[in-house]
Image (spheres, grey):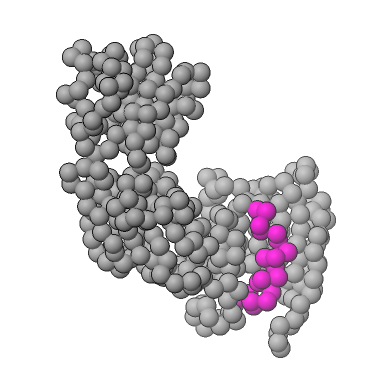
Amino acid sequence: MKITIIGISDRVPEFTAKEQRLIQSVKFFAGGSRHKQLVADLLPAESSWHDIIVPLSNLYKAIEDACDDWVIFASGDPLFYGIGITLKREFPDVKIDILPDFNSLQLLAHQFQLPYGEFQTISLTGRSFDAFDKALIQGKERMGILTDRKNTPTTIAHRMLDFGYTNYSMYFGECLGGENQRVLKLSIEDAAKMTFQHPNCFYLEKTDDVIPLKGIVESAFEPLEGRPKMITKMPIRMATLAFMELNTKKVFWDVGACTGSVSIDARLNHPHLKVVAFEIRKESEGIIHRNAQKFKAPGIEVLIGDYLQVQKRELKKPDAVFLGGYGGRMEAVLDDIHLYLKEKGLIAFNSVSESSKKRFVAWCHQRAYQITQSVQMSVDQFNPITILIAQKPDKPDF
């Protein structure tokens, strides 16, 4: 059995003589509904067609049951975030030939004569915004974006506007290579107001050198009403995050996030991190979101409610946790954090009193956590704060 994947654009293809002979020699074909419309008249009379739709398990079974050669039609380059990668993974022992066409971003670059090799490609086709948010925060100058019917240019532009990323031009293209092709150069504001046909993709190019601010003074955050001092001071915040070595971590929990200052600086300084902010106060949800928008920090997940009662089983386990609040139940909250924290993960705690310091240290000793940092700092006229960093053992006792 052999699988040949032929890439085509959004128009009736002009197959080479070799491709025509191949198509006439095969009985089993597959592709999307649009591909079928384009090639239907070129297939053998006794051919069998399988529509490629999710879940792909139906396609896999059809290929296995046929035990014969297949030709599969795909858009552009099948190895460019395409079905070629999927089939190579699913059928590692089957010979797979790839006959590519230009992919959509290449076709778009040709229209605007863009140096597409200098653009970072980010796929939002069936994917989260994680990679896109990371690129925005890092201030990537050039990006090529692949979309789908959910993550459209309009919804993506709205997300960029929500977090203040207006400093990009959009080079947009839809139905590329076909009779209904349309290409436009747009501002992010204009893109947010428009509707687009699928399939489409676009490039983003920065219009200035601005990147998000990092190390934000506490007075710049929107505070809790009547409690303006309930924000971790910037020098304490930055030192704590530095001691946590977040460049080596993947998932960061901010327990007792309050106004989101720690979550926001963690996100901006380490955009690869998955950041989850826990806060009991309902009013904090809006405050955290508004502060994140103000300081251009997309991608922070906010969970409102009593930390001990919030459902956490579906969350990715953290390897770094900042304990910013515990509602008088330090040991209970730490015990719960311990259940989810990965081995050798870190817990950071800023102690404002000798008694809270002793309680945290006592809990760490009881659970065999190693105190890796204990540093006292003072900011202006405020009382000294002790930054404590504790590391979970390799093989915890419970």
Task: Say which residue appears at 20% left-offset and 12% top-offset.
Answer: 46
Q: Is residue 146 visible?
A: yes
Residue 174 drawn in magenta: no
Q: Quadrant of the N terminus?
A: top left
Image coordinates for residue 129, horizontal then vertical, percent: 44, 53
Is residue 355 depicted above or below 360 in this figure? below
- The picture places residue 224, in percent across and down from the top left corner, at 51, 77
Q: Nearer the viewer, residue 380 or 52?
A: 52
- Determine if the magenta segment contains residue 237: yes
Q: Which residues are magenta?
A: 230-249
Residue 359 in sight here: no
Number of marks present in the image shown: 0
The residue at the point 47 percent across, 22 percent down is 91
The residue furthest bottom is: 381
Instruction: Check the image and report above or below for 325 versus 377.
Output: above
Quadrant of residue 158 within the rendered picture: bottom left
Left or right side of 291 for 218:
right
Question: Depth check: 93 or 269 in front?
Answer: 93
Which residue sits at x=60%, y=74%? 215
